[in-house]
Amino acid sequence: MKNETTDLLMQLEAIIDTAIDGILTIDTRGNVEQMNPAAAHLFGYNVDEVKGNNIKMLMPEPYHSEHDGYIHKYNTTKVPHIIGIGREVQGKKKNGDEFPFRLAVSEVILNNRVIYTGVIHDLSDVKSAEQEIKDLNKNLEETVSQRTYELEKTVNKLLSTNNAYKSEIVERKLAEQKLQDSQEELTRSLSKEKELNEMKSRFVSMASHEFRTPLTSILSSAAIIGRYDKEEQQDKREKHVNRIKASVANLTGILNDFLSLSKLEEGRVEINVGELNLNLLCMEIIEDTKQLLKSDQKINHTIHGENPLVIVDERILRNIVFNLISNAIKYSDKDISCDIYFNNDHFELVVKDQGIGIPLEDQKHLFTRFFRAGNVTNIQGTGLGLNIVKRYVEILGGSIRFESEHEVGTSFFIKVPYSNIENSNL
């Protein structure tokens, strides 16, 4: 048991040391006790230059002067200003440069001693992206203004010419139609550019939020595990180890969603079809998702009809099935079914849950990227999964539909014709 605990602590230390975000701990006087390499790199110091010194050495004014008073006030009143809440602040590097970052601080009681753990997420790229978007919008507005001005001049010139030359009315109408087409094309281009900018902003914001939450959960559980050093506390240790595993699985899912969306948007999805035993694939995915199952929850898998080898892209189909099953687990506390129906010209995959269902008013938006139904605000997710699933199904030449009732459950039906699969390999 001691060796297992030591191995686990070494794993947790490795996770913290290799974390992308900065992580550090201070005592109740504000002195730095621990600092991971990412935090040291952000501030331009070596770890040994910071450890033992007051944390305010990393702060510009007015934070530098206010910090000691803030810690004293919190230790006295326990009324949080940052601790347990988090906010955006400025940091000061060794060379004096300042940079923005998101700071999430948690209070940890370890061996009857209070320490404060901070997670630092550098916002320099986010701020740079925001400024770039503002500059793009400004340039677009100037372009629209200039184009509008040019269009107004051209239209006025055409109207003047029409009054002077009645005989050229046919040519004028053709010119007006051309101008109208140009204006519509410009409007479509500007609308598409605006949509792309909004997508960039939502992507940056969502990525920052979705990565920060599981990392904070991992850090919190890692700190708490150290308190459970007795054999009879094994169940508590396992609880937090499982919490860390779930957070890592969540991060992996988010990364896969973002990578899949990037490939789809850039048209870089390669199709590699081959023979596949669909039943074995589903059984492998069910085994992989067991760690996500909730208490007393299980997956029932059934085959209907003959089970031939199908010709399909295994990687794409695995992504589709994994996404649907993991969603069913996430949004339900009861058993889930995964059925395969083999027909003459197609196979059909049906995944059913008995979960929270999808509100009727949200169902028309279900496959829209970044969309999340109104009843899942407390459940983590990117809003990309079903959009990716639909696009992958279409790549396979198939179709997807669903049936859902609020607070009753949801069923997804994936139908892929054999002929389309075979033709995609020609």
Image: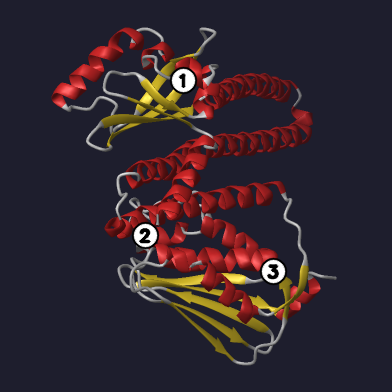
Residue 154 sits above or below residue 400 on the image:
above
Residue 288 sits above or below residue 200 on the image:
below
Q: CA distance from mark 2 to mark 1?
A: 40 Å
Q: Nearer the viewer, residue 134 or 219?
A: 219
Which mark is in front, 2 or 1? 1
Q: Which residue does the image show at 72% across and 55% down from the upper left?
A: 269
Q: Amino acid at mark 2?
A: Glu
Secondary structure category for the residue under label 3: helix
The first of marks 3 and 1 along the sequence is 1
Query: What numbered label is drawn on residue 361?
Result: 2
Q: Evaluate whether residue 382 shows in this view.
A: no
Residue 251 sits above or below residue 18 on the image:
below
Q: Quadrant of residue 233?
A: bottom left
Q: Please say if the residues under marks 2 and 1 sit with CB atoms less than 8 Å apart.
A: no
Q: CA distance from mark 3 to mark 1?
A: 44 Å
Q: Which residue does the image show at 44% across and 48% down from the upper left?
A: 6
Q: Amino acid at mark 1?
A: Pro
Quarter that holds the C terminus: bottom right
Residue 1 location (% of width, % of height)? 40, 57
Q: Is residue 8 left or right of residue 307?
A: left
Question: Which residue bears the numbered disc 1?
Answer: 100
Q: Residues within 10 Å of mark 3 (few under 14, many from 20)?
A: some
Q: Residues within 10 Å of mark 2 (few under 14, many from 20)?
A: few
Q: Nearer the viewer, residue 117 or 144?
A: 117
Question: Which residue bears the numbered disc 3?
Answer: 314
Q: Evaluate whether residue 264 shows in this view.
A: yes
Q: Residues within 10 Å of mark 1 (few under 14, many from 20)?
A: some
Q: Please say if the residues under marks 3 and 1 sit with CB atoms less than 8 Å apart.
A: no
Identify the residue at the far bottom of this view.
305
Count of numbered circles in the view? 3
Q: Is residue 421 left or right of residue 122?
A: right
